């Protein structure tokens, strides 16, 4: 909690919002490695961690500090687009999940469609129309087609978790799309549990230093990781 309070001050967030993001990413398990190569509390891909000078991915403070640095970068990128601080949080969460290029594409497409490009609800309203290669080409979407199903569910999940940590009722009701995100997370967690069981088996116990090299994956950007959308 002390680390969350320290670094959430840098980005102007309630520390419980930062906790909600980490909970949604890793359930506070510092040792987690995803099949896509992301690792640690903040589930950073190797290239992002390297850019933010993370030397030990298993060190909580390095991971949390780097996450705050990355969030600060995303906030600066989208501050001029978001209508207010609440909308900026949603834009930032979306970019953390799907990549800044995806959110920039959504803003561009919302403007082309005459929808609100400064609110998250406005961007969500046009995402279903972006899930087409022909539309992506016609409107010059840099990252290609995008359904946004997982990202919309992710933003709702983080904000709902924030409400739970504050001790209030979650603001969003469950939607069918949430099951898509939850199913993906469960499948990912099951894969991680299998990997961890192998790592910590008596015959294959690894030292703490070697854990950072387990299933490193490749250094794809979050935009590339989300191509399945």
Image (tube, rainbow, N blue to C red):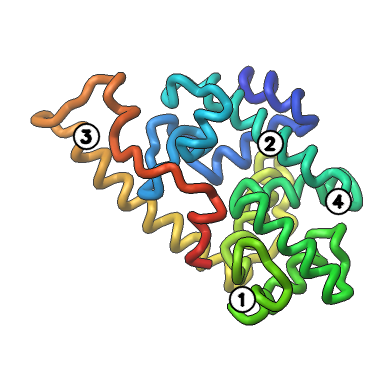
- Identify the residue position indicated by label 2 in the image: 71
Q: Using the numbered discs, state the Cα–Cα distance from disc 4 to disc 3 in whole angstroms.
A: 44 Å
Mark 4 or 3 closer to N-term?
A: 4
**Crowdedness of circle 1 by 10 Å Cα count: few (<14), some, many (20+)?**
some
Mark 1 or 3 closer to N-term?
A: 1
Mark 1 or 4 closer to N-term?
A: 4
Q: Nearer the viewer, residue 68 or 53?
A: 53
Mark 1 or 2 closer to N-term?
A: 2
Task: Report helix, strand or loop for mark 4.
Answer: loop
- Identify the residue position indicated by label 1 in the image: 131
- Identify the residue position indicated by label 4 in the image: 82
Labelled pair 4, 3 in contact (Cβ < 8 Å): no
From the top left corner, tell me how far across and down residue 222 is, in percent: 54, 50
Q: Is residue 32 above or below residue 147?
A: above
* Residue at 88% across, 46% down: 80
Q: Which mark is residue 24?
A: none
Q: Using the numbered discs, state the Cα–Cα distance from disc 2 to disc 3 in whole angstroms.
A: 31 Å
Mark 4 or 2 closer to N-term?
A: 2
Q: Using the numbered discs, state the Cα–Cα distance from disc 1 to disc 2 in whole angstroms.
A: 27 Å
* Residue at 84% across, 43% down: 79
Q: In which quarter of the image is residue 22?
A: top right
Mark 1 or 2: the one toward you? 1
Q: In which quarter of the image is the N terminus?
A: top right
Q: Quadrant of residue 112?
A: bottom right
Task: Report helix, strand or loop for mark 1.
Answer: loop
Q: Is residue 214 above or below residue 174?
A: above
Q: Residue 199 carries which label?
A: 3
From the top left corner, tell me how far across and down residue 11 is, in percent: 76, 30
* Residue at 77% across, 72% down: 125
């Amino acid at each position: 909690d002390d680390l969350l309070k320290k670094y959430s001050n840098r980005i102007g967030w309630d520390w419980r919002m930062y906790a909600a993001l980490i909970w949604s990413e890793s359930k506070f398990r510092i040792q987690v490695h995803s099949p896509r190569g992301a690792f640690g509390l903040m589930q950073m891909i190797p290239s992002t961690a390297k850019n933010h000078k993370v030397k030990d991915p298993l060190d909580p403070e390095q991971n949390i500090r780097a996450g705050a640095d990355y969030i600060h970068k995303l906030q600066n990128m989208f501050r001029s687009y978001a209508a207010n601080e609440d909308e900026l949080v949603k834009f930032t969460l979306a970019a953390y999940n799907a990549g800044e290029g995806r959110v920039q594409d959504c803003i561009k497409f919302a403007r082309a469609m005459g929808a609100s490009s400064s609110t998250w609800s406005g961007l969500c309203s046009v995402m279903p129309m972006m899930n087409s290669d022909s539309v992506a080409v016609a409107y010059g979407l840099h990252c290609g087609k995008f359904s946004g199903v997982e990202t919309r569910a992710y933003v709702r999940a983080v904000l709902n978790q924030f409400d739970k940590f504050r001790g209030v009722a979650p603001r969003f009701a469950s939607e069918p799309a949430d099951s898509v995100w939850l199913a993906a997370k469960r499948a990912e967690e099951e894969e991680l549990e299998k990997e961890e069981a192998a790592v910590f088996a008596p015959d294959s116990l690894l030292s703490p230093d070697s854990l950072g090299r387990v299933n490193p994956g490749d250094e794809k950007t979050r935009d590339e990781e989300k191509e399945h959308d």
